[in-house]
Image (cartoon, rainbow, N blue to C red):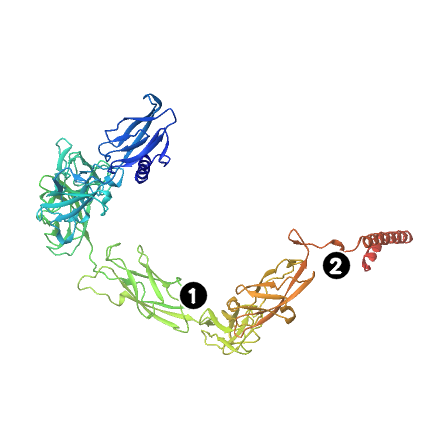
Amino acid sequence: MQVQLHCLCLLALYLTTGYGQERKFSGPLQPMTFSIFEGQEPSQVIFQFKANPPAVNFKLTGETDGILQIQQDGLLYHNKALDRETRAVHKLQVSALDASGAIVEGPVPITIEVKDINDNRPTFLQLKYEGSVRQNSRPGKPFMYVNATDLDDPTTPNGQLFYEIIIQLPKINNVMYFQINNKTGAISLTQQGSQELDPVKNALYSLVVSVKDMGGQSDHSFSDSTSVNIVVKENIWKAPEPVEIVENSTDPHPIKITQVQWNEPGAHYLLVEKEKMPSFPFSIDQEGNIYVTRPLDREEKDSYVFHALAKDETGTPLARSLQIRVKVKDINDNPPTCPSAVTVFEVQENENMGSNIGTFIAHDMDEENTPNSVLRYRIADQIPKISMGELFLMDSYLGVVQLAGQSLKKQDTPQYNLTIEVSDKDFKTLCHVEINVIDINDQIPIFEKSDYGNLTLAEDTAVGSTILTIQATDADEPFTGSSKILYHITQGDNEGQLGIDTDPQTNVGYVIIKKPLDFETVAIYNIVFQAENPEPLVPGVNYNTSSSATFKLIVKDVNEAPQFSQRVYQAIVVEDVAIGTRVGNVTAKDPENLDISYSLRGNRRGWLKIDPVTGEIFTAALLDREAESLYRVQVVATEVGGFSQSSTASFHLTLWDINDNPPRLAKEYTGLFLCHPLQQEGTLIFEVTDDDRQSLLHQHVSFSIGSESFQHDWNVLRINDTHGKLSTKGTNFEERVYNVPIRVRDGGRPPLEGLVYLPVTFCRCVEGRCFRPAGHQSGMPTVGMAVGILLTTCLVIGVILAVVFIRIKKNEGKDNVQSAQASEAQPLRN
């Protein structure tokens, strides 16, 4: 029976979900912690403690709650299901007792941690929630909360709650106006709700909000729901009506002018200027009251536009800003002002009574089209006065000055001075007007002579040259529009070759050349001048022949150089054209219609020739683009006869390339080597090019071994259009130089190929470099040879010195310089 009970205990121990710290089912008496899920079936074995003699029994104390027990043989178990919500942690003590009940071991602390299971449903704190929101509130800003509780462990999914709006009534166009934070239960407006909520259309909305545990998982989770009624209130965050402020107010400042208010208390207000001003005259307090801080001047600025902004405690704007408009109301605080210190009018002496002399307009800085800026005009005084009554009249509101009496005479009074009184409803200002009587244009200009004779000029006379001076006089008042003279050419110069400048002080006319003269176009000009005034003549007076004069201009021919039709001629040919091919044509014309002979200058390669009569240009030799791709020469056109004058133009011949050069090595390869003996197949990289345009080379260049005798041991591959790779086949090579032939074929049309040789040296290598002992290198003398050469050299030098010494002795007394020169003239021999 005892064995059967022990087996049952072990089976129960295996089935339990709570294990000790070392994941064993039995062990010595020592401090331990066990984790057990709540809600387990009763009579579950937790652990079996073992004690050493003389211990024969165990005792359990602490927070057992009548559930946790221990048997005599050390089996710790619970007789009821544990409940985490009642007690999450049980603090116990276990002691080992002897037969007399005395403690022989312990007590040791034992901790039972009750692990949570999802055995509690979340519950809202209220069956119904009530809330309100203002229209146009900021989306995402919470305006109310719903709350639920769950007795399960909040650190596990069992107690993690998930909120969700499942019903919105009414739901317009299937658009959700409200949203909820699924973790906090905070309810706020969506973007559409912020824009579309309107208490006039729908003032009440009903929501059904659900809450789930397990973080909102649909499986194995509990849920609850509640209803939420939301009242939509009118938005009070609105732009106020435009404000009018009377300028230059003497009331104490600041003065409240309007107010803005956010939908909820606690907002922070500020004003934002639309345009930066040196001194912004408005302020706002934290109640939303807006003040003007100083008197305003309409003439300085007649209106203001700025914005009011509301922010939350973090400085985030609660909504879009509101526009504040302020208009400054005008008062009559500015007197009229004169347009200038003196206003000058002119009147001709033959003006009729009632004629308008001028319009006098004063200014007022007060607001236009108001009584403050309506002006009245009156002539307050006139100097000199006349006995026959008023000479001038003035319109009271338009300011038009009219002649009220008889025609004026300049010789009687050349000038009148008026004092004008300008008034608005509160102010008066005196202004001054000067009226000058001017002479009428009743005299015509008269030339000093009617014919200025003949003038002969060379056709190359410079443009801008003055060729003639003319003079007419006018008897009208000097320095007026009536006496000023303007000269015009009325006949004989249809192309405008000539022009006339007038001296405004003397009325002298200067005839100048405006465009180049051309004998071949016009040889003789019969010019007719006309003298006129800028002011119109009075009725009954007309210009006549006295205001006209003539003059003949004779253009003298000048021999001019031929002129090419263009400065630069261009042609394009292929470089392999046959000799004698026509490549271009130049044309020049002589202004005197003389024959022209063409020649070439700068034809340094002799590639071209020109027909001296027609100007046709032909090839005179084979062309070569690689020598010169753009060939430039000068073409000379020389007149035949006359003074043989000539001119030049440029002829540019562009040569198009053909594939006439086979590929070649891009450089001399003298240092290619492979280390002998080869341990593996060797490779070498080389580059090719040719003298043709590179686009011809860079078209599928191919490489091949150029000799069958080398094909067994060597291979060549194409890397790209400019590089190839030479490699060995195998490793059996002698220690010597191999001149490997490589055939390179370009992609031209037709293609060309070249045979190049790559010298590859097989040599012993030291530290990656080719090495040869000095005694085995070609051309290097041995030690014995070097000594022999040195002795021979010394012997030759000795003989030469002896001969020179003997000759000097024999030729003593002769000129040493001549002897030295004669010696230098003889060739040296080895």
Q: Give 449 or 573, whichever is nearer the viewer.
A: 573
Residue at 38%, 25% in the rendered image: 53
Q: Give 37 or 395, whichever is nearer the viewer.
A: 37
Q: Nearer the viewer, mark 1 or mark 2?
A: 2
Q: Crowdedness of circle 1 by 10 Å Cα count: few (<14), some, many (20+)? A: some
Q: Position of residue 224 (x, y in %)?
A: 16, 43
Q: Are marks 1 and 2 in contact (CB under 8 Å)?
A: no
Give the image quarter of residue 524.
bottom left
Q: Position of residue 232 (x, y in %)?
A: 11, 44
Q: Position of residue 306 (x, y in %)?
A: 19, 42
Q: Secondary structure at mark 1?
A: loop
Identify the amino acid type marked 2: Ser
Q: Secondary structure at mark 2?
A: loop
Q: Does 140 sit above or below residue 403?
A: above
Q: Position of residue 528 (x, y in %)?
A: 31, 68
> What residue would you read off at disc 1?
461
**Where, quadrant-wise, is the N terminus in this rendering?**
top left
In the rendered structure, find residue 147 and report the number of the disc placed on it. none
Identify the amino acid type marked 1: Thr
Q: Is residue 129 visible?
A: no
Give the image quarter of residue 485.
bottom left
Which mark sits nearer the N-terminus, 1 or 2? 1
Left or right of residue 218: residue 687: right
> What residue would you read off at disc 2?
778
